[in-house]
Amino acid sequence: MTLATTNPPSAFGRFARATPVLGRVIRDIERDTSSIYYLLVIVLTAVVLAIQTWGLAALVLTALALVPVMFILLILIARP
């Protein structure tokens, strides 16, 4: 019989799990991976409501915040 070993979370992982909102989301996603879709819908709804409220400024700040994410995705895609 083999036991599954898991790596202990890093310092950032422990800190993220200790925060009230983010920790609950992380633990929920670890238990059920399909809940990530609910999180994406909530984030998309928040962005749409922010654009309706503040207009172009909210759209520009959202795009600016997603630039590092896109750079990381492009680097991951381009790796051999």
Image (tube, helix red, strand yellow):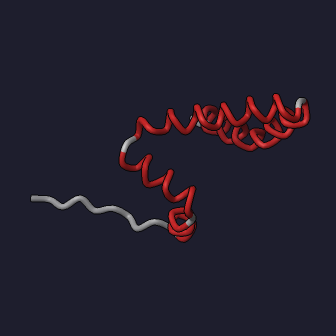
Identify which residue is drawn at 61% across, 32% down: 77
Report the front residue among 78 and 30. 30
Single out the residue that lies furthest toward the bottom. Answer: 11
Identify which residue is drawn at 14% across, 59% down: 2
Q: Quadrant of the C terminus?
A: top right
Q: Quadrant of the N terminus?
A: bottom left
Identify which residue is drawn at 67% across, 42% down: 72
Residue 13 position within the rendered picture, expressed as x and y whole percent measured from the top left: 52, 63
Report the front residue among 54 and 78. 54
Residue 65 position within the rendered picture, expressed as x and y whole percent measured from the top left: 78, 43
Please give the count of numbered marks on the rendered protein: 0
* Position of 43 relative to 23 (above/below): above
Report the front residue among 55 and 36. 55
Residue 11 position within the rendered picture, expressed as x and y whole percent measured from the top left: 54, 71
Single out the residue that lies furthest toward the front. Answer: 53
* Residue 45 falls left or right of residue 27: right
Residue 71 position within the rendered picture, expressed as x and y whole percent measured from the top left: 72, 39
Q: Quadrant of residue 76?
A: top right
Identify which residue is drawn at 51% across, 63% down: 17
Report the front residue among 56 and 66. 56
